Amino acid sequence: MTSKVLVVDTKYSQCASKMPEIFDFGGLDVSGKTVLIKPNLLFYTEPEQGLNTHPTLLKAIVEECERRGAKKVYLGDNAGQVMYGDSKSAFYESAGMEVLGDYYVNLGIDLEPYELKSVSHMVYISKLLRQVDVVINVPKFKTHGLVGISGATKNTFGYLPGAQKSKMHYLAKTYELFAKVLVEVHMIRKPDLNITDGIIGQEGRGPFSRKLRYMGQLLVSKDPVAADSVLCSMIGFQPSDIPHLRIAQEEGLGTYTDVEVIGKPRIMPDFVLPPNSDTPWAINGDNGVLTPSLIRDAHRTVIEVNPETCMQCGKCAEECPVGAIDMKEGFPVMNGTPCASCHACQEACPVKALVLQSTFTGEVRQAPFYK
């Protein structure tokens, strides 16, 4: 079946006026329904830095949901690569997000198990993902040093809270397997609509690139693979060269071979691609597709408690989704159950007396583009 992608020419100041067209195109019926908006929240930052989905775009989506009679609108993500277990701070300390504070929801707590068959590993995701009626995925138009692009298909990797993301990097020993993880996580709860923020995007060494590129466009589609294929066409990638897009098409998640584009994507032949983009994605030795910091995070399975500040309230044990913490003599201790690395215990602590520490002691072999 042909997938359609709508290309919307706009500016951030005009986003609100474009929402009726976008919602109608997506066929979104949100009246009387609960809606989760999932942005790309990478780091606390100014919107001008282009790291996160722009707050003006998010505000326009929220307001359109409410105008169409949504029962409840949530806005949440699990911050990537940094500040594991602290997505609330990432949200509230990002300039422009404060006006959306009433919609924030912590996707790192109140979790339920889900087995990822690709790596034979149990992960824990927010129950809200299955409870809401509608999910709107709002990624940022960016390159990515590990997987080529960070678009609609990859943005849902943020479903995984805490260091579970880095654990997936560690378990996936090749980019092919990591691509399967990305696709499988996306399919845990396939979004009902994808709106890619390509008004200002990133080029070069993403997703933390300081090299911004103005495009003035939003990419809209029910099909994340189709949306990402248009992104690829704009910057010079072949979708089939991006492992997670190829596998997503093979798994029936979407298509990049049968796409109808409505509008005119901005083609940028001088767009700066990430390092190693002209060769097959390399693997990071036996350590998997990891940077040193991600490897350490992937091994965060030991809690450390400050007895001087601990209130002995037991909230950390109550919030642990796998029951890995017991209270002994008033203090939390690990009981031998494998830690989910979700940081729910750390988030639940009202006095920040508990942190997760790394058990990793080995040497790290870096991918060439991180040297």
Image (cartoon, rainbow, N blue to C red):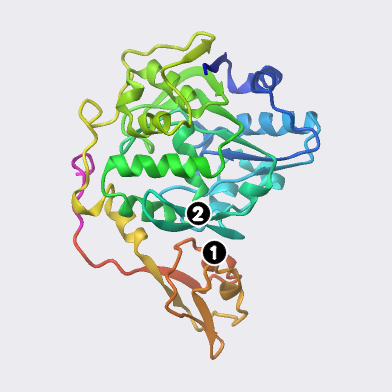
Q: Residues within 10 Å of mark 2 (few under 14, many from 20)?
A: many
Where residue 21 sits in the image (x, y, percent)?
A: 68, 17
- The quadrant holding residue 255 is top left
What mark, if any, has residue 344 been given in the picture? 1
Between residue 106 and residue 208, name the one nearer to us.
106
Q: CA distance from mark 2 to mark 1?
A: 9 Å
Q: Quadrant of the C terminus?
A: top left
Pointer 2 residue: 161
Task: Answer left or right for 281 relative to 343.
Answer: left
Regarding residue 329, the answer to whether it shows in the image is yes
Task: Answer left or right for 122 relative to 10.
Answer: left
Task: Answer left or right for 61 relative to 295.
Answer: right
Q: Earlier in the sequence, mark 2 or mark 1?
A: 2
Where residue 96 sits in the image (x, y, percent)?
A: 61, 38
Residue type, numbered disc 1? Ala
The reply to whether discs 2 and 1 touch (Cβ–Cβ < 8 Å) is: yes
- What main secondary structure does the magenta stretch of the protein show? loop
Q: Provide the secondary structure element on which disc 2 rests.
A: loop
Q: Is residue 230 above or below residue 181?
A: above
Q: Is residue 358 magenta?
A: no
**Residue at position x 45%, y 43% from top?**
184
Q: Which residues are magenta?
A: 364-371
Q: Is residue 362 above or below residue 368?
A: below
Q: Provide the secondary structure element on which disc 1 rests.
A: helix
**Residue at position x 52%, y 18% from top?**
1
